[in-house]
Image: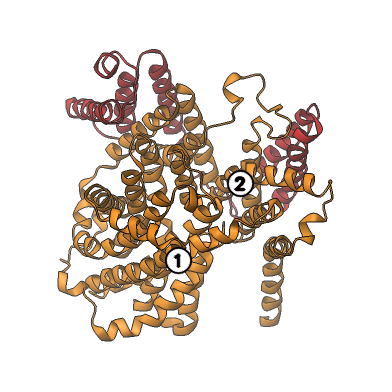
Chain colours: A red, B orange
């Protein structure tokens, strides 16, 4: 059926998943908001019922079809891992190291050759960010280099 | 209207730092708009956190400059490469690139520049004179009017979601739901916080915007297949400056198109939620109906209409934000973030409480549009080289670093970064699922207004829902809300009837 309509099966699957997610969210909202006082629960309950109606309507009239064809799974996983690693580094080591790793990682994932040139450019951008935010704007970015410099 | 404040703001706008900041903003906007993959919202998402330590008279000219010119900058790659630099130049690419193929690249760029400047300036004048007037009138608005206006804004953005109304509705409801996180305004009861201390004050707006508009683009660039390098598709024919200057006869020919597209753009821009794409499609449709098959074959009006329409939406979309405190689109929602960061409260009181800033913003729109003309003509010739010179991997890496730093800087904590990353992921998935982001943003910003106005109305009317329809203005707006919500169904019915008649 989906082939007949010119719709790829995975796209239809993603749209159905969205409808299910919407329905699941609606049920969760309605359950959670039951424990709230009347005035606090009023709007969440209305949103919950509307989400439920929307889930049904999304199943029937999905509109523009989802398009995940161009997404490369391996790259997506690497991107997520990189961003999570960068956030962890910012929290536990410092923004200078976290941003440097993020810059090098992003450029490498997109196919930029990993070499001295990239590492130096990453260093230059991180130094520029540190100078603008720490020096000009007075935002104390944490880090083993930024910390003592802009404290 | 306070003409003395307007005059003082005008004089201040021409002093050194505001003018330099505005000039830098216009140049930056033209450059980022002309780079495929970047646009005004991404740039503003990155810039808003940077501006919070700046004085308002430097911060707002910079943001206004970027907002005004990025939309016009998008027409350069649209015309030269048939790659729209921004979504608003998607229709400019059709006739613009056809003109390039006919060896009229200079003329196409000239038409885009003249159209954008003319319509942008006209729209900025509408903002200058209309926003303070509407703000004065809005002082008489009660909670019922605010409630109805906010609901009207949401219905517009859902109803205008051409062929995608249900996904727009989903985005809108999700935005409302995210806005519910934190203390409820009436009872002070924590909602959807799940005991987390960080969620008690709700999710911070700016990191959400940074994630949705900045990081989602980074995720998109990093995880999708690389397309043919834009630089390879550039027509190498040199563009002469003289070719970009339009003759008097061409200006006379395009004037009616500019006027009609500007009128349409201003009308749609003022309406919260209607959006730029609606304006350009309607303006282009008018040209298509008038010229038939010549449209799409390199027709000057085919470039003039969408460019005039999209630039007139820019300034007029600030009217509801500055006068009512309700953003007209996603980009003006970023402006809302910038105003809040500066400690200003957008709405009817803005022109009375902070006339210097409010009038400076509106005056900057006029000056920015006028600046676009010389800077546009100058940069149009450099854009092909610029697009070739910037490697996409370094661009993506720089945006990622700036987004994460900006998100951190807002609250000096990693919580903002985590919020930005989460919403970056949501933005990426939304883009792939074809769920529009504008309804989400508008709902997120309007939810507190709706909830507060609803409870105030209930208190004033002793709990009677009829209060919303007994107030004439509120009733009118609710009627329009109903029409916008029924519009997708009506359009479906009309299309079916037309198909039945044709067969």
- Pinpoint residue B11: horizontal percent, then vertical percent: 28, 57
Whole-percent x, y for residue B393 in the image: 30, 38
Whichever of callouts 2 and 1 sits on the residue coming sooner in the sequence is: 1
Quarter of the C terminus of chain B within the rendering: bottom right
**In the drawing, what numbered circle is on residue B129?**
1
Vertical side of A67 occupied by A96: above or below: above
Asked whether B366 or B354 is in front, the reply is: B354
Mark 2 or 1: the one toward you:
1
Residue B74 position within the rendered picture, expressed as x and y whole percent measured from the top left: 34, 58
Task: Report, in whole angstroms, how far the alpha carbon at label 2 lies from the one at label 1.
Answer: 25 Å
Residue named by callout 2: B446
Above or below, A26 against A148 in this view is below
Question: Could you tell whether B6 is left or right of B17 in the image?
Answer: right
Give the side of residue A16 with respect to residue B350, left or right.
Answer: right
Q: Secondary structure at mark 2?
A: helix
Does the image show residue B161? no
Question: Do the residues bearing badges 2 and 1 touch, measured as CB atoms within 8 Å?
Answer: no
The subunit letter for the residue under badge 2 reads B
- What element does badge 1 sit on? helix
State whether residue A102 appears in this view: yes
């Amino acid at each position: 059926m989906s082939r007949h309509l010119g719709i790829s099966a995975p796209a239809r699957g993603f749209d159905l998943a969205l409808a299910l997610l919407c329905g699941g969210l609606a049920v969760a909202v309605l359950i959670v908001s039951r424990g709230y006082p009347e005035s606090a629960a009023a709007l969440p309950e209305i949103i919950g019922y509307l989400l439920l109606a929307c889930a049904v309507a999304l199943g029937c009239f999905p509109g523009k079809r989802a398009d995940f064809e161009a997404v490369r799974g391996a790259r997506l996983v690497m991107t997520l891992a990189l961003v999570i690693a960068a956030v962890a580094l910012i929290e536990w080591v410092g923004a200078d190291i976290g941003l440097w790793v993020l810059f090098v990682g992003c450029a490498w994932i997109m196919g930029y050759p990993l070499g001295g040139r990239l590492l130096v450019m990453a260093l230059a951008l991180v130094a520029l960010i540190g100078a603008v935010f720490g020096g000009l704007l007075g935002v104390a970015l944490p880090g083993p280099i930024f910390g003592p410099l802009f404290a | 209207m306070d003409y003395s404040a307007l005059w003082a703001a005008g004089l201040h706008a021409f002093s050194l730092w505001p003018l330099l900041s505005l000039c830098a903003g216009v140049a930056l906007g033209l450059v980022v708009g002309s780079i495929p993959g970047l646009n005004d919202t991404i740039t503003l998402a990155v810039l808003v956190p940077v501006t919070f330590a700046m004085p308002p008279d430097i911060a707002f000219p910079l943001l206004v400059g970027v907002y005004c010119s990025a939309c016009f900058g998008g027409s350069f790659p649209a015309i030269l490469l048939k790659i729209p630099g921004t979504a608003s130049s998607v229709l400019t690419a059709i006739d613009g690139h056809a003109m390039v193929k006919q060896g009229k690249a200079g003329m196409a760029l000239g038409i885009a520049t003249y159209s954008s400047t003319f319509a942008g300036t006209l729209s900025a004048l509408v903002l200058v004179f209309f926003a303070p007037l509407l703000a004065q009138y809005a002082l008489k608005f009660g909670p019922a009017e605010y409630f109805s206006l906010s609901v009207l804004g949401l219905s517009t953005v859902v109803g205008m979601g051409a062929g995608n109304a249900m996904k727009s509705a989903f985005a809108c409801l999700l935005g409302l739901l995210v806005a519910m996180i934190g203390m409820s305004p009436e009872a002070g009861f924590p909602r959807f916080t799940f005991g987390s201390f960080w969620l008690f004050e709700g999710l911070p707006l700016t990191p959400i915007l940074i994630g949705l508009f900045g990081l989602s683009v980074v995720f998109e660039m990093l995880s999708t297949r690389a397309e043919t390098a834009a630089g390879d598709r550039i027509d190498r024919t040199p563009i002469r400056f003289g070719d970009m200057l339009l003759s008097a006869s061409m200006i006379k020919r395009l004037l009616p198109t500019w006027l009609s597209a500007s009128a349409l753009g201003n009308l749609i821009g003022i309406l919260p939620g209607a959006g730029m794409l609606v304006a350009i499609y309607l303006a282009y449709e008018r040209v298509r109906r008038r010229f038939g098959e010549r449209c799409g074959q390199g027709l000057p009006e085919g470039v003039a209409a969408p460019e005039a329409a999209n630039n007139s939406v820019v300034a007029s979309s600030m009217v509801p934000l500055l006068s009512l405190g309700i953003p007209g689109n996603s980009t003006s929602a970023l402006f809302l973030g910038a105003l809040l960061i500066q400690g200003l409260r957008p709405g009817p009181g803005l022109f009375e409480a902070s006339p210097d800033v409010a009038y400076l913003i509106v005056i900057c729109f006029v000056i920015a549009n006028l600046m676009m003309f010389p800077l546009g003509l100058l940069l149009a010739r450099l854009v092909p080289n610029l697009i070739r010179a910037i490697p996409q991997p370094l661009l993506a890496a720089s945006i990622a670093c700036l987004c994460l730093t900006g998100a951190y800087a807002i609250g000096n904590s990693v919580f903002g970064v985590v919020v930005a990353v989460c919403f970056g992921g949501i933005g990426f998935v939304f883009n792939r699922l074809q769920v529009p982001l504008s309804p989400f943003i508008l709902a997120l910003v309007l939810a507190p207004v709706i909830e507060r106005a609803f409870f105030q109305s209930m208190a004033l009317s002793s709990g009677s829902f009829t209060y919303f329809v007994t107030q004439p203005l509120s009733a009118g707006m609710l009627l329009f809300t109903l029409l916008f919500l029924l519009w997708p169904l009506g359009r479906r019915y009309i299309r079916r009837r037309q198909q039945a008649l044709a067969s």
